[in-house]
């Protein structure tokens, strides 16, 4: 049986057990396999069961499949999530009891040589369902034009010692993975949701970045130090947004004063962000709600000023962390985002010309030019997010590295990840470097080691695999919802035009399906500059076209939707407009 994979002696794949005509097959989920593979001999399996199997390929080309393990699952959603975790090699083993024995309260001996900030009204601001709280905020006005911003971050390094079994496993995981109704934590929950989490009304050990910021949003001075805080409240983004817009009173005067100054400071930081050329994209995100092991609906993720307030505070602290590591002459791990290459910029320029976006000069690889494009897209119409996808495609992926090459998207020269050590190993690594300067003078300006470079590559790969799994789970859940709507019509927008057809994102489901070019009628269509053009009639399909489509097929496991066009609003509008213009 031919395989797309290169022939080798043996290899392990993850797949689904399927039965066809009394014979069992493995339907591979591991990328690179096209055909189902038959099990040899008699096997006892359940339809749809997740299996890890070893495939052996003889020199003759014959295959034999040996089951290595059968994955226990509770329901269809659990089955899908675990299969994707296995396929993409995301560690999700249960934690060894030997590395989960940690205190529930802060030991008084740990308070020595720490600043006591328990009298300040620190608060955490997170989503409604969050359970682990990395960061807490306190802001006060120091004079008529300046503020003092305290960003307190959980002191995970105090509990997770270098090269301990827990540290080795956390490094292997690289980061926490957040999925609907399922979380794979980088640290045991006893730590991430317990002693490390900045829960309200309890003492917690933290590393503080204290910043003085002026009315122009510039950090004029900063310092890092160990401290202890006592959170005054666990707030949500919704609550803080309502407080900042005077729709809801704060829980106390101290919290109200801090949040009031925080909002004023945020507006200055936001203005500074725009001035330097940082890129902002129109939010277009969703999440699938799961109940009792089944996807029930797709909800829109709405971002408000409270989200942006926290984002700007975290960015300010991350900038200081990067600068601090450089000032100390240490090999810091930086969050870098390289500028786009000339080929990507040329492709983007061609797409923008197609949508008649008036750019009065040739695009260059500068944040300011890309910011100009995004601003013009938002001015051009309500569906700017469709075109912003093209801008995103032109950008490189951010990564972790020990050479500080700057962050293009944030328009920053110095940037590191410092603020989330509960869920990102990169931040824990930076914490350790920062804390190491509190006790002793370290050797400066040492060459970056091979182990450090490998760590940066490893953590970047961990982030990528988490993103891939998250996307695949999201698509699987949405397809699971859509399978009951086969034959139903929906409206959507063309979000991608390819030589072989159109991808249309369906309203309210936030997932794109394919109208294959063969479904566009008998006319021959030519692909021209991100358009499909009819050879005889000049009928054109373009990015942003509004179509009504009918769902004709749903393959849940591969997350593929097949669509056909029902109605083309854009073409009808163009035709009616042309008719009116003729008179």
Image (tube, rainbow, N blue to C red):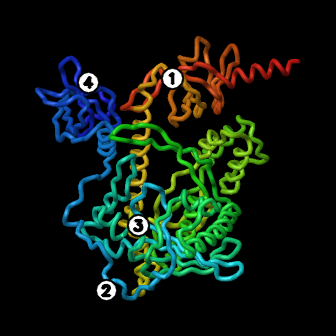
Q: Is residue 116 left or right of residue 29?
A: right
- Tell me which label, 2 or 3, sits earlier in the chain: 2
* Disc 2 to disc 4, C-alpha distance: 66 Å
Query: On the image, numbered disc 1 is attached to which residue?
Result: 563
Mark 4 residue crowding within 10 angstroms, few (<14) / some (14–19) / many (20+): few
Residue 435 horizontal/vertical position (percent): 41, 79
> Which of these two is toward me, 123 or 420?
123
Judge whether residue 460 can be spotted in this image.
Answer: yes
Task: Categorize mark 1 by other alpha carbons within 10 Å: few (<14), some (14-19), many (20+).
Answer: many
User: In whole angstroms, how far apart are the C-alphas of marks 4 and 3?
Assistant: 48 Å
Q: Quadrant of residue 67?
A: top left
Closer to the eye: label 4 or 3: 3
Residue nearest the observer in this picture, 302 or 439: 302
Inter-mark Cα distance, 2 to 3: 23 Å
Question: Around disc 3, counting alpha carbons within 10 Å, would you say few (fewer than 14), some (14 to 19), or many (20 or more)?
Answer: many
Q: Which mark is residue 1?
A: 4
Q: Residue 109 bears which disc, if any?
A: 2
Helix, strand or loop at label 1? It is: strand
């Amino acid at each position: 049986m031919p395989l797309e994979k290169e022939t080798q002696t043996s290899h392990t794949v993850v797949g689904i057990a399927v039965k066809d005509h009394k014979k069992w097959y493995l339907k591979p989920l591991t990328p690179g396999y096209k055909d189902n593979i038959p099990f040899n001999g008699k096997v006892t399996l359940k339809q749809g069961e997740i299996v890890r199997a070893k495939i052996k390929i003889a020199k003759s080309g014959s295959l034999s499949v040996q089951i290595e393990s059968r994955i226990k699952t509770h329901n269809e959603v659990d089955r899908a999530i675990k299969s994707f975790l296995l396929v993409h090699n995301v560690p999700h083993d249960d934690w060894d009891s030997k590395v989960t024995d940690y205190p529930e309260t802060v030991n008084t001996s740990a308070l020595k040589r720490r600043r006591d900030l328990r009298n300040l009204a620190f608060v955490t601001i997170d989503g409604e369902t969050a359970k682990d709280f990395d960061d807490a905020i306190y802001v006060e006005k120091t004079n008529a034009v300046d503020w003092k911003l305290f960003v307190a971050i959980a002191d995970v390094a105090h509990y997770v010692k270098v090269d301990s079994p827990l540290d080795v496993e956390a490094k292997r995981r690289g980061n926490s993975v957040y999925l609907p109704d399922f979380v794979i934590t980088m640290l045991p929950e006893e730590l991430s949701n317990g002693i490390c989490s900045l829960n309200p009304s309890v003492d917690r050990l933290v590393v503080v970045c204290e910043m003085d910021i002026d009315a122009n949003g510039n950090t004029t001075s900063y310092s890092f130090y160990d401290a202890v805080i006592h959170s005054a409240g666990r707030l949500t983004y919704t609550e803080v947004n309502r407080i900042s817009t005077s729709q809801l009173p704060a829980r106390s005067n101290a919290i109200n004063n801090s949040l009031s100054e925080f909002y004023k400071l945020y507006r200055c930081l936001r203005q500074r962000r725009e001035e330097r050329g940082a890129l902002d994209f129109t939010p277009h995100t969703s999440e699938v709600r799961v109940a009792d092991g089944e996807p029930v609906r797709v909800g829109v993720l709405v971002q408000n000023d409270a989200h942006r307030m926290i984002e700007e505070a975290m960015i300010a602290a991350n900038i200081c962390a990067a600068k601090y590591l450089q000032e100390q002459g240490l090999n810091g791990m930086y969050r870098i985002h390289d500028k786009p290459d000339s080929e990507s910029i040329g492709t983007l320029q061609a797409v923008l010309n197609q949508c008649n976006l008036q750019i009065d000069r040739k695009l260059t690889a500068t944040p300011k030019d890309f910011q100009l494009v995004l601003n013009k897209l938002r001015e051009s119409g309500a569906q700017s997010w469709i075109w912003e996808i093209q801008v995103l495609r032109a950008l490189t992926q951010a990564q972790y590295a020990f050479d500080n090459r700057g962050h293009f998207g944030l328009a920053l020269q110095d940037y590191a990840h410092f603020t989330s050590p509960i869920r990102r190993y990169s931040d824990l690594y930076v914490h350790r470097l920062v804390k190491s300067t509190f006790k002793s003078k370290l050797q400066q300006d040492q060459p970056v080691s091979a182990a450090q470079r490998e760590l940066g590559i490893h953590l970047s790969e961990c982030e990528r695999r988490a993103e891939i799994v998250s996307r695949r789970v999201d698509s699987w859940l949405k397809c699971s919802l859509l399978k009951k709507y086969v034959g139903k019509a929906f409206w959507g927008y063309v979000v991608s035009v390819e030589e072989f057809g159109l991808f249309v994102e369906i309203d309210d489901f936030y997932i794109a399906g394919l109208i294959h070019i063969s479904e566009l009628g008998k006319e021959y269509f030519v692909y021209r500059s991100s358009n499909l053009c009819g050879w005889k009639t000049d009928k054109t399909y373009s990015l942003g076209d509004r179509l009504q489509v009918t769902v004709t097929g749903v393959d849940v496991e591969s997350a593929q939707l097949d669509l056909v066009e029902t109605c083309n609003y854009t073409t009808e509008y163009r035709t009616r407009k042309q008719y009116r213009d003729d008179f």
